[in-house]
Amino acid sequence: MFKRPEPEDSGQERRWLRQLKAVIETQIARRPFLFQMRAVARQLRYEREHWSVLIPFLLLVFIVVYRRERARVLELARRLSD
């Protein structure tokens, strides 16, 4: 019913996947933001059993920092408009 791939087909497919992975790795390495995001994703994967505490904590930290920085930006905009 199902055909097995020819040995050269699977080798060609593996080569194509290796090339694709190499291109992706190169693009990630060239962009610091993507490199850091991948590192954060890996760290989160390692801490999977602690996600029930970690994710809400990170969300809380994000909200606090965002509000503080947003207030600074609004204050600066108000000062510049005066």
Image (tube, rainbow, N blue to C red):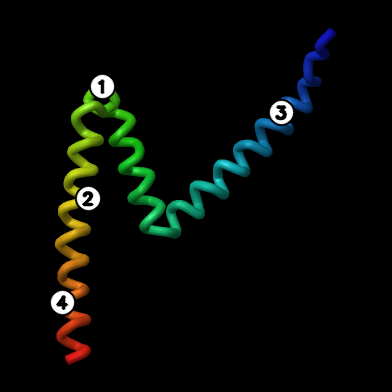
Q: Decide: marks 2, 3 in contact (CB < 8 A)?
A: no
Q: Quadrant of residue 11?
A: top right
Q: Quadrant of residue 19?
A: top right
Q: Residues within 10 Å of mark 3 (few under 14, many from 20)?
A: few
- Label 4 and label 2: CA atoms lie apart by 20 Å
Quadrant containing the C terminus is bottom left
Q: Position of residue 39 (x, y in %)?
A: 33, 43
Height in image: 59 above or below 73? Answer: above
Height in image: 35 above or below 11? Answer: below
Q: Amino acid at mark 4?
A: Glu
Q: Position of residue 26 (x, y in %)?
A: 50, 52
Determine which residue is flagged by label 3: 11
Q: Between tags 2 and 1, which lies in front?
A: 2
Determine which residue is flagged by label 2: 62
Q: Tag 1, which secondary structure?
A: helix
Q: Residues within 10 Å of mark 2 (few under 14, many from 20)?
A: few
Q: Amino acid at mark 1?
A: Glu
Sequence-earlier tag: 2 or 3 = 3
Determine which residue is flagged by label 1: 49
Q: Amino acid at mark 3?
A: Gly
- Label 1 and label 3: CA atoms lie apart by 37 Å
- Horizontal side, residue 24 vs residue 10: left or right: left
Q: Tag 2, which secondary structure?
A: helix
Q: Position of residue 63 (x, y in %)?
A: 21, 51
Q: Decide: marks 4, 1 in contact (CB < 8 A)?
A: no
Determine which residue is flagged by label 4: 75
